[in-house]
Image (cartoon, grey):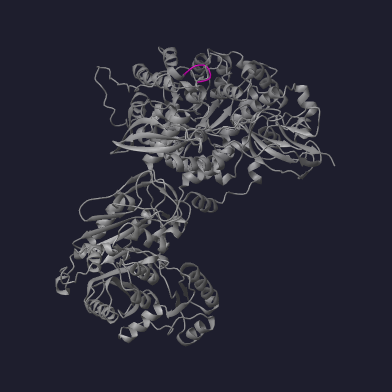
């Protein structure tokens, strides 16, 4: 800034000769440059040289004019002890203190013995809060003295100090003085500098707001008298403390201009710096029109110092490049800036102050409001600033009253309850910049969307061709029955409905099955109001829970609770259904019972009505946990039977008596609705007729809801069979997201039921209209397509659930098993048999899938698995199942596989929740608050309990990139073209108009690129790591399978945890590392006793299958 403003600028010394501070203090070099280039005067600013008498002498000796007091006056006033003596001589009140500077602790002790505590130790030479300590008790006196003297010596070259009685809660008042070369002194009134931190001023006010007139007049009079007594010239400041009885005490005179002189200029209209120069040139105060009778104040002014300090980290200075700099302005707003501009690099070498904001108003309150508004208008990005703290300070009642004291900040911890800037725009640009450089980082995405246009929202028309107003959601539906009468009234209304109701799965299971659960909240909300009208007669809308919960955090970087609330607001009439995994909640393993209660309660409060409670093993004890949680929360409890295998095959263990027995147990738990969950789509039409018919015969008043997948292509026939046999509700999905691993087509079911007594109450024309939206949306999400070409009747053999089938195809390709997909399907069937033919639904379906991929990856036959079970490193999910952490399977665990695989691990024979400690929610709240700042919500806590690591990663992501849920999906998944303009609505009334301008060249030094966007007409840039530039191609040695000392990675993945180092002693089976591949984690264990050597990997490394991890040398 100084070089930009100056007519001429010169480097002090040669490049590298001085440190940054050293160059500033190189007085001989400064004088030499001034002489060489014909300068006549030197203004020392308000740094250390301004109070350095030796520097002033050097200036005058060189024949130049020093703009400031004479060296002799600086000597007499720069020493606080000398200044104190002068004040006493001039009969100006002083705080009781030592008569002179002290160097020994014994002298300090003598003072405290006479005057007591508290005291303040101050450096005799210097200021700025350095070498200053407040001591309140004798126990800390010696240490404080030593610290103060050491700090003073380091900062000023002189460790002497003096001691004063410390006044509690005083005000700090300073008087601006001007003196000419003829003995004339005037004051420019006072400033209130009481708002300080560590004795350094933060905010200043002129004039003081709550200083009695008589006290003010006396202070001003004494300040002038004291300055005259030393023949003061030029600008200076006399500083006083005023106690709570309005008694004042002289502290010191600062023989220089102060940082806060600007507010005095604002209220007096006097340019103090110009007056300094003119006085130095010989002008008298009278010639300048600065006689005391002509100086008056007008209004109030407040100065705030904006610094690059982080208040949340004890005002730790921040460094880095300023990415955005937008300043305030307007009437009464003055900015005195330094290096504040976009692109400026803030280094640790200089003062952290960026800009002084001085605001003037006719009253104190007007000035305060202007200052607050100015702070709000600032946009500084790239480095942290104290603006949030300043805003908190200016809005505190004590500051509003103008009654602050010198320790106000230290005494008021609530000032640090900061509401920082959200920095939404710059964070969003950082994500878009990363997209422009590196492409999409969304896991599972292959290529770019096939459709990038604007999706057309369909219109709905009534029977007479009139357009239906969908600006407001529909209010009529089965949810009103539930809200008015509760769960039992809802169940009764469903059972009494003369036709067959439908549940639409489009907003959850359909896109989970076909698009890897990647549909974002914004695209669900965009069609929500239309859905409330078109599907008003639905039994329920499945839109939450299950895999959609963690995928929202994990891959879409959005809050699933926010999705629930937004959908609930737009669809108030249709009951929302979620998938609850019994004692697991929405996690993949059992949790303490109070975690389930807490989660269900808040799911109900935020909008879920129907809870489809299931257990992956149909374990009634596990089911009971979820059912009771729903009943406590007041939700509709749909106790669910998971259908597996082929009921028509007499060789299968899951037969009709098995299912009827389970239904009896669920009814005994007082469920509201019975759910039949056919997760693999293996419920054949004939089996459906028998099963539903038998249940209906036994329980004529029990509402029955059937869920299925259309994997084999028989979904429509099976659902129609269920309806005819007595089911009250069946599942369907919008046509464009139906079939195969999704649910049957909704219009196909409507057509199949047409002409029967099973009317759904839905208008086929409205249903088709909604589908026009989803057909466009599927093209937008084409990068996540499973590319299934048709039905797969093999599902009757392998029994892979619909959603898992899609995920496994993708997962197999990621693990390098894509070409072995047929083999993987066969291995799934074999893995299921090895595990005892278990019910396969999340999380047990994952167990079977992980074992299948493990077998294919390691070329293992079922016989190999059984034979080598005691030495294989099974996937973590398999071990958790065998341990009993997922419950007890029907028919028991497979032996001897279980015992061999578990080795020394425990075996649970009861539900795992009984052995788990209850969740300490207060502890979690405190921990989340510590990690992420703001007070966490109950929903945050519930999400964290379900997925701690996933939740933490999500919070870190949004801390960096902000809330991306506002970003249109086509820009979330693909970069815009150069010059393409698009809009992002942050919130109502706040729209960003963005345009990608350019992507800069790669910096070979940093591996980064600058990306330039235009935002609302302003050019902004972000710095992005080019991930291609930083990738290292590491070729790792392979483990020799014939050498038992070599430990290899069992499959490709990322090492998320390393538990040993070179030299570690291990025993057979001890964990060496944890490998993660997609959602699968497995422990790599020691093959035998020995010592770890030749460790080849670090945490975070990517490895391929069989890559050498380490060697275990036998003892």
Would residue 499 be seen by someone viewing this image from the given angle? no
Please tell me in which quadrant of the rendered image residue 54 appears: bottom left
How far from the left and from the top, in percent, is residue 563?
A: 42, 35
- 774 drawn magenta: no
Residue 1001: x %, y % from top left: 44, 31
With respect to residue 811, does 326 lie above or below?
below
Which quadrant of the structure image shows residue 961?
A: top left
Q: How many labels does the image show?
A: 0
Where residue 326 sits: x, y (%)?
31, 46
Q: Quadrant of residue 408?
A: bottom left
> Is residue 539 found left or right of 1112 in the rendered image?
left
Task: Please report the bounds of the magenta region as a residue range.
Answer: 738-742
* 213, 38: nearer the viewer: 38
Quarter of the figure that contains the C terminus: top right
Q: Nearer the viewer, residue 310 or 893?
A: 310
Check the image and report above or below for 975 versus 311: above
Relative to 560, residue 283 above or below = below
Q: In this view, does 126 lie to the left or right of 227?
A: right
Work out whether 908 lies above or below 243.
above
Residue extending farthest to the right is 1115
Where residue 598 appears, as percent x and y from the top left, is 51, 45
Q: Can residue 613 be seen in this view?
A: yes
Point 81% across, 40% down: residue: 1089
The main secondary structure of the magenta stretch is loop
Give left or right: position of 412 versus 1006: left
């Amino acid at each position: 800034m100084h070089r930009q403003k100056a007519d001429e600028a010169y480097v002090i010394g040669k490049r590298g000769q001085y440190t940054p501070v050293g160059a500033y203090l190189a007085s001989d070099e400064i004088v030499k440059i001034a002489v060489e280039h014909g300068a006549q005067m030197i203004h020392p600013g308000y740094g250390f040289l301004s109070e350095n008498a030796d520097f002033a002498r050097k200036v005058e000796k060189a024949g130049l004019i020093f703009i400031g007091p004479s060296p002799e006056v600086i000597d007499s006033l720069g020493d606080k002890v000398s200044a104190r003596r002068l004040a006493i001589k001039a009969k100006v009140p002083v705080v009781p203190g030592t008569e002179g500077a002290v160097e020994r602790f014994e002298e300090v002790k003598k003072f405290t013995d006479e005057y007591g505590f508290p005291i303040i130790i101050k450096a005799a030479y210097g200021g700025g809060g350095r070498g200053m300590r407040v001591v309140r008790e004798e126990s800390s006196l010696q240490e404080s003295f030593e610290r103060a003297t050491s700090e003073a010596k380091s900062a000023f070259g002189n460790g002497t100090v003096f001691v004063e009685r410390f006044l509690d809660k005083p005000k700090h008042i300073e008087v601006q003085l001007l003196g000419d070369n003829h003995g004339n002194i005037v004051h420019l009134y006072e400033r209130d500098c009481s708002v300080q931190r560590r004795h350094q001023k933060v905010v200043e006010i002129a004039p003081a707001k709550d200083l009695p007139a008589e006290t003010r007049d006396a202070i001003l009079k004494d300040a002038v008298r004291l300055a005259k007594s030393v023949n003061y010239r030029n600008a200076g400041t006399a500083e006083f403390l005023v106690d709570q009885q309005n008694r004042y005490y002289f502290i010191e005179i600062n023989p220089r201009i102060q940082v806060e002189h600007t507010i005095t200029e604002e209220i007096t209209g006097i340019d103090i710096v110009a007056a300094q120069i003119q006085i130095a040139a010989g002008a008298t105060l009278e010639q300048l029109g600065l006689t005391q009778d002509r100086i008056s104040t007008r209004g109030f002014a407040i100065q705030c110092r904006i610094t690059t300090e982080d208040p949340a980290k004890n005002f730790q200075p921040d460094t880095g490049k300023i990415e955005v700099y937008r300043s305030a302005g307007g009437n009464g707003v003055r900015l005195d800036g330094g290096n504040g501009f976009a692109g400026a690099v803030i280094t640790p070498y200089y003062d952290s102050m960026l800009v002084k904001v001085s605001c003037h108003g006719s009253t104190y309150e007007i000035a305060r409001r202007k200052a607050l508004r100015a702070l709000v208008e600032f946009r500084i990005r790239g480095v942290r600033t104290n603006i949030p703290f300043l805003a908190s300070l200016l809005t505190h009642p004590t500051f509003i009253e103008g009654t602050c004291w010198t320790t106000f900040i230290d005494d008021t911890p609530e000032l640090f309850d900061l509401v920082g800037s959200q920095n939404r725009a710059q964070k969003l640009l950082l994500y878009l910049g990363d997209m422009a450089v590196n492409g999409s980082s969304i896991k599972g995405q292959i290529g770019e969307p096939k459709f990038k246009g604007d999706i057309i929202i369909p219109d709905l028309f009534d029977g007479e061709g009139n357009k239906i107003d969908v600006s407001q959601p529909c209010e009529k539906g089965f949810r009103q029955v539930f809200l008015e009468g509760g769960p039992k009234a809802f169940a009764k209304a469903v059972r009494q409905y003369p036709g067959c109701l439908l549940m639409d799965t489009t907003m959850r299971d359909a896109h989970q099955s076909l698009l890897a659960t990647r549909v974002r909240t914004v695209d669900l909300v965009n069609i929500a109001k239309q859905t409330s009208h078109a599907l008003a007669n639905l039994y329920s809308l499945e839109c939450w829970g299950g895999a959609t919960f963690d995928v929202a955090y994990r891959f879409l970087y959005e809050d699933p609770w926010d999705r629930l609330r937004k959908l609930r607001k737009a669809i108030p009439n249709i009951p929302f259904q979620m998938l609850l995994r019994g004692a697991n909640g929405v996690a993949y393993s059992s949790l303490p019972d109070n975690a389930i209660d807490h989660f269900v309660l808040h799911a109900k409060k935020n909008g879920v009505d129907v809870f489809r409670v299931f257990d992956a093993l149909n374990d009634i004890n596990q089911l009971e946990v979820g059912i009771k949680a729903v009943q406590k929360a007041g939700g509709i409890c749909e106790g669910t039977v998971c259908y597996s295998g082929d009921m028509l095959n007499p060789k299968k263990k899951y037969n009709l008596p098995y299912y009827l027995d389970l239904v009896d147990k669920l009814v005994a738990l007082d469920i509201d609705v019975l759910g039949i969950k056919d997760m693999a789509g293996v419920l054949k039409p004939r089996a459906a007729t028998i099963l539903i018919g038998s249940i209906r015969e036994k329980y004529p008043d029990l509402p029955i809801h059937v869920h299925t997948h259309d994997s084999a292509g028989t979904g429509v026939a099976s659902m129609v069979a269920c309806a005819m046999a007595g089911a009250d509700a069946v599942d369907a999905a919008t046509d464009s997201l139906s079939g195969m691993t999704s649910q049957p087509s909704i219009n196909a079911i409507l057509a199949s039921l047409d002409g029967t007594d099973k009317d759904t109450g839905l208008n086929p024309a409205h249903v088709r209209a909604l589908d026009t939206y989803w057909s466009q949306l599927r093209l937008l999400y084409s990068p996540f397509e499973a590319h299934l070409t048709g039905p797969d009747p093999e599902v009757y053999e392998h029994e892979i659930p619909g959603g898992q089938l899609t995920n496994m195809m993708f997962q197999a390709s990621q693990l390098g098993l894509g070409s072995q997909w047929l083999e993987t399907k066969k291995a799934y069937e074999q893995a299921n048999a090895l595990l005892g033919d278990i019910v396969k639904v999340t999380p047990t379906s994952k167990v079977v899938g992980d074992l299948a991929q493990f077998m294919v990856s390691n070329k293992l036959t079922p016989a190999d698995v059984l034979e080598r079970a005691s030495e294989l490193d099974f996937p973590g999910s398999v071990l958790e199942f065998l341990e009993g952490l997922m419950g007890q399977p029907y028919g028991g665990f497979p032996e001897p596989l279980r015992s061999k695989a578990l080795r020394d691990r425990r075996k649970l024979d009861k539900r795992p929740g009984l052995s788990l400690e209850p969740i300490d929610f207060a502890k979690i709240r405190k921990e989340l608050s510590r990690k992420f700042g703001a007070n966490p919500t109950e929903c945050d806590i519930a999400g964290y309990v379900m997925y701690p690591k996933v939740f933490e990663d999500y919070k870190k992501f949004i801390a960096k990139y902000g809330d991306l849920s506002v970003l249109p999906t086509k820009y979330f998944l693909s970069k815009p073209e150069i010059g393409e303009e698009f809009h992002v609505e942050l919130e109502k009334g706040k729209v960003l108009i963005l345009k990608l301008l350019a992507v800069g060249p790669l910096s070979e030094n940093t591996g980064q690129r600058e990306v330039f966007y235009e935002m609302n007409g302003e050019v902004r840039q972000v710095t992005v790591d080019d991930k291609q530039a930083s990738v290292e191609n590491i070729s790792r040695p392979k483990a020799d399978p014939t050498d038992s000392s070599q430990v290899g990675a069992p499959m490709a993945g990322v090492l998320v945890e390393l538990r040993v180092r070179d030299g570690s002693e291990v025993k057979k089976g001890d964990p060496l590392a944890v490998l993660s591949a997609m959602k699968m984690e497995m422990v790599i264990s020691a093959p035998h006793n020995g010592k770890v050597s030749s460790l080849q990997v670090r945490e975070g490394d990517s490895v391929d299958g069989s890559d050498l991890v380490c060697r275990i040398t036998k003892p």
